[in-house]
Amino acid sequence: MSFKIRKINKNSFNKQLILPLTFKSIKNRENFIISSSNQSAIQLIENSNYWQKETNSIPAAIIYGPKGCGKTHLSNIFKDNNNSIYLDDLLSFNLDLINKENSFIIDNFYPSRVYPAELVMHFLNRVINSDGSVLFLSTLSPHMMDWGLEDLNSRIRSLISSEIKIPDDVLLYSFIVKYSNDKKLFLSDKHIFYILQRVERSFENIIKMIDKLDYYCLEKKEKVNYKTIRAVFESLSLR
């Protein structure tokens, strides 16, 4: 079976690197990695002062970044803290159900059939007038969205936004070391580089890969080797 190999500059890795990681427990996820790529986003959602109507006339914000960068996992923290209602479209949601101080998470947010501009405007007005709050998740920055309504464009672009970037290879290397060690699954540098060159650069896929590798080795009673790693790649299609 062939794998797409990504070139990695191994000279950029410092073997004495202090892992630039902290972990946060969130619902349905044992660990969530906090790094420079998402630190501003997590500070935004955990800043309780920002989400108070007294300090912000429009308590809403946008977190954006490419698929797999951790937006949904990060929003789980916001959901837990605010008892938020999760929506991935507005067409099937009755705006009359918006109650005082409701909190919402709106996923896959960009101009589309399920987010028509006029409905988005009505939704925002209802939430704001009800002293509620909204966290928008998107693959697009606010300034890349064109809603076809100048008032809505202006409002969306005026919201505080935070970008989550795809982690670089050095950070992913550190994460693999930390996450696999926590599971008592000890990988050599060669194994780690082998994984890095073949897996999509996202924490989500790294976690799936290590979890599956750990389970596979325990089930088969085998040590980690290239054969077991290839078998896990094939079973997960993470290539």
Image (spheres, rainbow, N blue to C red):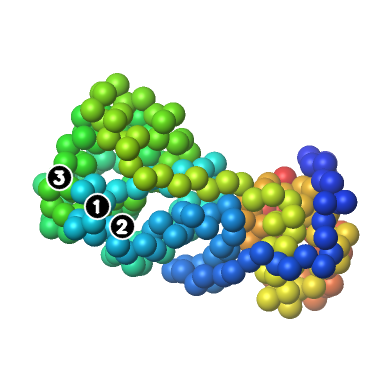
Instruction: Write down the residue under mark 1.
Output: 56
Q: Foreground residue, 206 or 239?
A: 206
Q: Foreground residue, 100 or 225?
A: 100
- Image mark for residue 50: 2
Furthest residue to the top? 148
Q: Which of the two labelled residues, at mark 2 and mark 3, occupies the earlier sequence position? A: 2
Q: Is residue 160 above or below residue 194?
A: above
Task: Name the residue type under label 3.
Answer: Arg
Q: Is residue 34 left or right of residue 186?
A: left
Q: Secondary structure at mark 1?
A: loop
Classify 10 Å Cα crowding around label 1: few (below 14), some (14-19), many (20 and above).
Answer: few
Classify 10 Å Cα crowding around label 2: few (below 14), some (14-19), many (20 and above).
Answer: some
Q: Secondary structure at mark 3?
A: helix
Q: CA distance from mark 3 to mark 1?
A: 16 Å
Q: CA distance from mark 2 to mark 3?
A: 19 Å
Q: Which one is closest to the eye, mark 2 or mark 3?
A: 2
Q: Do the CB atoms of the residues marked 1 and 2 lie less than 8 Å apart?
A: yes
Residue drawn 82% across the image and 46% down it? 8
Q: Is residue 222 left or right of residue 42?
A: right
Query: Residue 134, position in %: x, y?
Result: 29, 50
Task: Name the residue type under label 2.
Answer: Tyr
Q: CA distance from mark 1 to mark 2?
A: 6 Å
Using the rendered image of the protein, determine whether residue 138 is visible from the camera's viewpoint: yes
Q: Is residue 6 above or below residue 195?
A: above
Query: Residue 181, position in %: x, y?
Result: 73, 74
